[in-house]
């Protein structure tokens, strides 16, 4: 879906109840899914197991606990879940340390949210140390706060991270838009009661009620975000 300038102008004039935008990190704002896959593939190869494209569709989007359990089951690697998770994170940190590419349109979207005064939170299944590392590229000042996967009892695909983010912003989840790239995060956002914009990175995503699927963040702007949340009770924010 491409929003032209004229279409954006029309959307911008529509009353909106949008209160906040909650954004995923890996594969959504930064192009790190290949880094996770490289880390996982290289480590399992060291134990004699080759991961396939089908495996990638299972592990994309995390969370780490589910990913590790799956990788141990398919590979038979002689490691504990905690140890493999630690090794994957260490290898990922090494790869990210070489630089993190932004997804097309990410910087422009974050700049527009800031210019329009729309609260934004970063909600990721990645652990805190990973988020803090990537924030050096994204800029921590762009977000009201960040939620890490190791800071909630249940991370994605459970709704807890997005429910927590909305609550911390004092927002109604039904008046928040979640921006995600993978099925795990999309399920979390929808279960939290949020509108969801899906921008697939690895796994194709189908449209569904309450869900908008775009080919790129370059197609997403504030006018479109506002159009997804109708004004409620004559009040907009």
Image (cartoon, grey):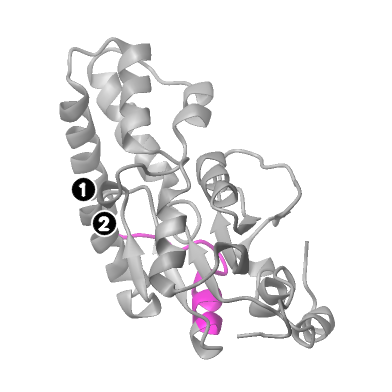
Find residue 98 and name its label: 2
| Residue at the extreme front | 233
| Residue at the extreme top | 76
Mark 2 vs mark 1, CA separation in Å? 7 Å
Circle 1 is placed at which residue position?
94
In screen coordinates, is 181 left or right of 142? right
- If the image is split into quadrants, where does the C terminus sit? bottom right
Span of residues in magenta: 98-113
Does any portion of residue 18 appear in the rendered image? yes
Label 1 element class: helix
Residue at image x 38%, y 69%? 168
Compared to residue 176, the image places residue 53 above or below, namely above
In screen coordinates, is 30 left or right of 149? right
Q: Position of residue 160 (x, y in %)?
A: 42, 49
Residue at image x 26%, y 47%? 150
Residue 111 magenta: yes
For label 1, the crowd category at 10 Å Cα-Cα, with few meaning under 14, some 14 to 19 and many 20 or more, is: few
Compared to residue 181, the image places residue 20 above or below, namely below
For label 2, the crowd category at 10 Å Cα-Cα, with few meaning under 14, some 14 to 19 and many 20 or more, is: few
User: Do callouts 2 and 1 mark residues in contact (Cβ within 8 Å)?
Assistant: yes
Residue at image x 24%, y 61%? 133
Q: Position of residue 200 (x, y in %)?
A: 61, 48
Residue at image x 56%, y 60%? 178
């Amino acid at each position: 879906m491409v929003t032209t300038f004229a279409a954006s102008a029309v959307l911008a004039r529509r009353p909106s109840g949008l209160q906040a935008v909650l954004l995923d990190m890996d594969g959504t704002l930064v192009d790190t899914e290949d880094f996770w896959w490289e880390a996982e593939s290289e480590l399992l190869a060291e134990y004699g197991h080759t991961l396939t494209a089908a495996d990638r569709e299972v592990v994309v989007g995390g969370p780490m606990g589910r990913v590790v359990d799956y990788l141990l089951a398919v590979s038979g690697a002689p490691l504990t879940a905690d140890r493999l998770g630690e090794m994957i994170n260490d290898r990922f940190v090494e790869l990210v340390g070489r630089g993190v590419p932004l997804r097309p349109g990410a910087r422009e979207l974050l700049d527009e949210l800031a210019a329009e005064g729309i609260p934004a939170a970063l909600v990721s299944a990645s652990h805190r140390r990973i988020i803090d590392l990537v924030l050096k590229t994204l800029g921590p000042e762009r977000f009201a706060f960040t939620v890490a996967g190791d800071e909630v009892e249940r991370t994605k695909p459970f709704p807890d991270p997005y429910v927590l983010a909305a609550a911390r912003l004092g927002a109604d989840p039904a008046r928040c838009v979640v921006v995600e790239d993978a099925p795990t995060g999309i399920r979390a956002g929808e279960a939290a009661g949020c509108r969801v914009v899906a921008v697939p990175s690895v796994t194709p995503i189908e449209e569904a009620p309450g869900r908008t699927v775009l080919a790129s963040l370059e197609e997403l702007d504030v006018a479109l975000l506002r159009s997804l949340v109708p004004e409620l009770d004559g009040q907009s924010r």
